[in-house]
Amino acid sequence: MDALSLGSAADPRRRGRGDSGPGASPMPWARFSAWLECVCVVTFDLELGQAMELVYPYDFRLTEKEKTNICYLSFPDSYSGGLGDTQFSFRLRQSGGQRNTHFVDDGEYNREAPLTLQWESAHYFGYVYFRQVKDSSMKRGYFQKSLVLVSRLPYVNLFQSLLQLIAPEYFDKLEPCLEAVCNEIDQWPPPVPGQTLNLPVMGIVIQVRIPSRVDKPGSSPLKQFNQENLLPAPLVLPSVHELDLFRCFQPVLIHIQMLWELMLLGEPIVVMAPSPTVSSEMVLALTSCLTPLKYCCDYRPYFTIHDSEFKEYTTRTQAPPNIVVGVTNPFFIKTLQHWPHILRIGELKMSGDLPKQVKVKKLTKLKTLDTKPGIYTSYKTFLHKDKTLIKRLLKGIQRKRPSEVQSALLRRHLLELTQSFIIPLEHYMASLMPLQRAITPWKNPPQIRPFRQEDFMKTLEHAGPQLTCVLRGDWLGLYRRFFKSPNFDGWYRQRHKEMTQKLEALHLEAICEANIVAWMKDKSEVEIVDLVLKLREKLVRARCHHLPVKEEMLQRVGLYIETIIGSLPEDLQAVLHHH
């Protein structure tokens, strides 16, 4: 699985990648690494099977396990391979512990990006363009090759669009073309949330807006601007990550409610599809349907029997993990038939009518060989079906509404559903925050009160989801089940962390507004030294954790510390300055 290297030792760009942030350093590959980890080419070798032909930049290190997994995940299963070009995505667990990434980000991107678009530290995303065409010059009679972009960013739309530009050119011209493209990406500005960027590649400018945490959910993603200076006109991508939800969910539109609940509860789901394209798009569409709530479970848009996690997911000695896994090999029907929810879908076809909707079937109806499309589950939904959504989508089909308009309808429905569910939780969580008047400068800030599930349930009578959502059903039962899911745990931890930081920021503000000199009058040297050490620790925490505090306040605390030290005897001053 060894990769060939590109570029010669004499080329100064090949010395290795830079170690600092993309804005700060012109080091080779520093900017490239803000977008991509590496580019791989996987080919079919008669003796080895799938083999890694090259990894670029050549000094990027993948472990052998990662190389093997990428090789298998970059080719469609033999069951689903047709001639022509195919695009799909996968997600891969990083193996071999933390590694130095050449893009050093102090966490700024993740602080500003939506929780659903975080830069992943423990997983890689793979974006694949696979070509299989007849070629009499090859021993097998076929040319089979995949170009794979490996990134930490879930920008499926951007990277698949990029592949449509570069892969056909690469298959035609090979290495020099790939080297030129990577050098161009190494000139791109970094992905800064909230900014609209122009990204030049192969004579085209891709224009994208990087979503930000402060964006209003459901707002229009891209305001086009500064186009008049750009020639040729840019390729404007309306979103870096959003899929055509209407197309992805076509065969399951009447079950959207059930799928939303299963995702909310973090239930184990198998998606069995005819191709990696359908499999990966369905899994990614499912994980996106909780926005703005972050889906905190694992997901694998495309998975093969050769994957290093195969045993872990197929074992029957323990309950299936909280994961959505997309597969194409019929063998999985046998190995995963103990999973509680199996979604079997056929090829997605856009037609002028509502496509045939799959039926909900009992798991016992699952046949090992010829399993018909359907949702195989014994799950009973907590909420009643929303018939108005289906009627609106049907009306859209009859009126030949564009797919993106139908997708926007679907996305808004899912957003409103998620918000109706999450807003009561947000309100209750906010009520656990101590009152501002309880925060005094010379005492540790009070604790956030604990989350009591029964207390929360009592609030629902007057402030529950029924106030904002027309759907009826057992909302209480849904919350009780949600409390046991990784999605609740992830949501609670994130909120608790944000509230703790807010408390620390308010405490710093209280200190800044206090009269330190008056406080020091009747204090011993020990108490004053103790205060200096605590204030210093607070200052370090505020800077390290990027607390929501203005810089001028931090500077004022720094001055306070100097003032206090200046009032102490010289020997203590020397010790504190040294400390």
Image: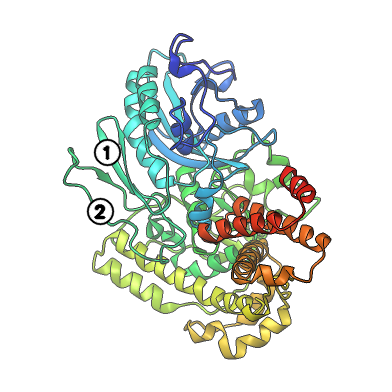
Residue 536: quarter of image:
bottom right
Residue 529's x, y, as percent? 78, 57
| Kind of element beneath mark 2 | loop
**Residue 373 in view (yes/no):** no
Q: Nearer the viewer, residue 187 or 459?
A: 187
| Kind of element beneath mark 1 | strand
Q: Residue at x 41, y 66 (%)?
A: 216
**Who comes first in sequence, dot 2 or dot 1?**
1
Q: Nearer the viewer, residue 577 or 17?
A: 577
Residue 415's x, y, as percent? 45, 69
**Residue 261 in view (yes/no):** yes
Position of the C terminus by quadrant = top right
Q: Nearer the viewer, residue 342 or 466?
A: 466
Q: Residue at x 28, y 57 (%)?
A: 223
Residue 309: quarter of image:
top right
Q: Residue at x 50, y 73 (%)?
A: 419
Up the image or down, 483 lies above or below 322; here it is below
Crowding at label 1, few (<14), some or many (≥20) Cα neighbours within 10 Å?
some
Q: Residue 224: which numbered mark, if any?
A: 2
Total residue callouts: 2
| Residue under pointer 1 | 205
Q: Using residue 9 as the reference point, say whether residue 323 is left or right of it.
A: right
What is the three-letter code of the residue carrying label 1?
Answer: Val
